[in-house]
Image (cartoon, rainbow, N blue to C red):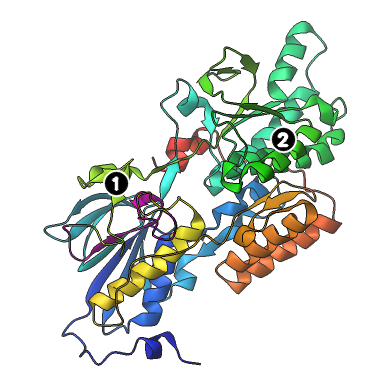
Amino acid sequence: MRTWRQRYRTSAPLPASPAKIVVVGGGFGGFYALRTLQKLLEPERATLTLVAPNDYLLYSPLLPEVATGVLDPRDIAVSLRQTLRRTKTVLGHVGSVDFDGRRLSVKGRESETELEWDKLILAPGSVTRQFDIPGVAENAHGLKTLSEATFIRNHVLAQLDAADTLPDTPAGRAERVERLTVVAVGAGYTGTEFVAQMQNWIKGIATRWASIDPDDVRWLLVDVAPAVLPELGEQLGKEAMDVLAERGVEVRLEVSVESATETTVTLTDGTVVPSRTLVWGAGVAPSPLIAKLGLPTEKGRLVVEPDLSVPGHPGVWALGDAAAVPNLAADPSAPTPPTAQHAQRQGVRAARNVAASLGVGQAKPYVHKDLGLVADLGGFDGVAKPLGVQLKGPVAKFVARGYHLYALPTAAARVRVATDWLYASILPTRVVNLDQVRSEDALIAKAQGS
């Protein structure tokens, strides 16, 4: 079998000095771009540098299973330095980019660094969209980082602990309702998978508290959209709705949050929900870095050509959630959806196009037909649409887990995740509040660097 370098073999002479390639963002797009560049380009042809806030790639689709304690946080955190051995990793956030001088500044935890580049790939990803709703920034927690997932798990356990000790008085009963009500905003993948898996987990452990019955915990899923999991279509969305309803989860559609406080969530229809747990999964917005670049955007995402290059800036490419990549496989007038599947494949295509600019291979536009989507609803439930085939129940659950094992980027990560899934199926559920993350550190702005 031919290696990647043999497949893209070139007769182009090596340069006098290697090109400096800098990739911004250690998510799916940046990770797969660098992994591909390591295979395509010899060290004599290019040096590789990654700028990222963390030293790991987070496999974010499995964050709900971290929040429910099924998976250890380290299971889905893939070491960048161990996996991308040829790449220099610089930890921090990009403060500014000088396109004319081909320099960028990186703000680390303790110092600021300046990097020079010949080729630049922008893949800074996205952050949770908050919509500037009063009280959300101060009281809501997202589910996009390990700190957020870990905090939510510990926070929910802490609410059960506190509710279990409250006196049977009017004030005590009112506070008990606040502590035993969980509000999740966003009926897409993040919100739906979270509330489904968390409800299933709490139902299995709630009896460990003397005065709490599983039915005492109220679950509310809210979305301004008219359907749950609209990406999967009407039929599977209805199937997910039926699963949630059977478990006692309240779903409020075509309504959103008007404001939030530490103890209440007010909906746009005037309903005031007493709750001390607000989980925010109402979509994503491009990384704040994009707005600082001064380049054309489309709905906040950087405008790019079909080959992922940035117009007017030779040697610059952008991809993933932060770029409006034309969806040539479906509707070229609309960008590809911000999914891990697209980011991963755009990373590979961007790497090949960068290599082509250095004389290795040929540049091509990005074209990828969606392979399908999966949603794990906890227990034996799931919905999935691989290659257009609609699945539900245990079969969909099996397909969802199989897909995640396939998509995890290393064999070690696959073994760890599969092992924890096996343990969770045969051993008692772990119910330990390690209190590892402070509430203020898990707020969306701080946890996601936005």
Does residue 91 show up magenta in the picture? no
Can residue 31 be seen here?
A: no
Q: Residue at x 70, y 23 (%)?
A: 179
Determine the image quadrant of residue 325.
Answer: bottom left
Image x and y of residue 423, in percent: 79, 60
Q: Residue at x 30, y 72 (%)?
A: 353
- Against 166, residue 231 (above or below) is below
Q: Which residue is mark 2?
A: 157
Q: Magenta segment, which residues?
A: 312-330
Is residue 241 rendered to the left or right of residue 81? Answer: right
Dot 2 surroundings within 10 Å: few (below 14), some, or many (20 or more)? many
- Name the amino acid type tagged 1: Ile
Image x and y of residue 20, in percent: 24, 72
Residue extending furthest toward the top? 170
Q: Which residue is mark 1?
A: 290
- The residue nearer to you, when weighing 286 against 112, is 286
Can residue 417 be seen here?
A: yes
Q: Residue at x 81, y 25 (%)?
A: 216
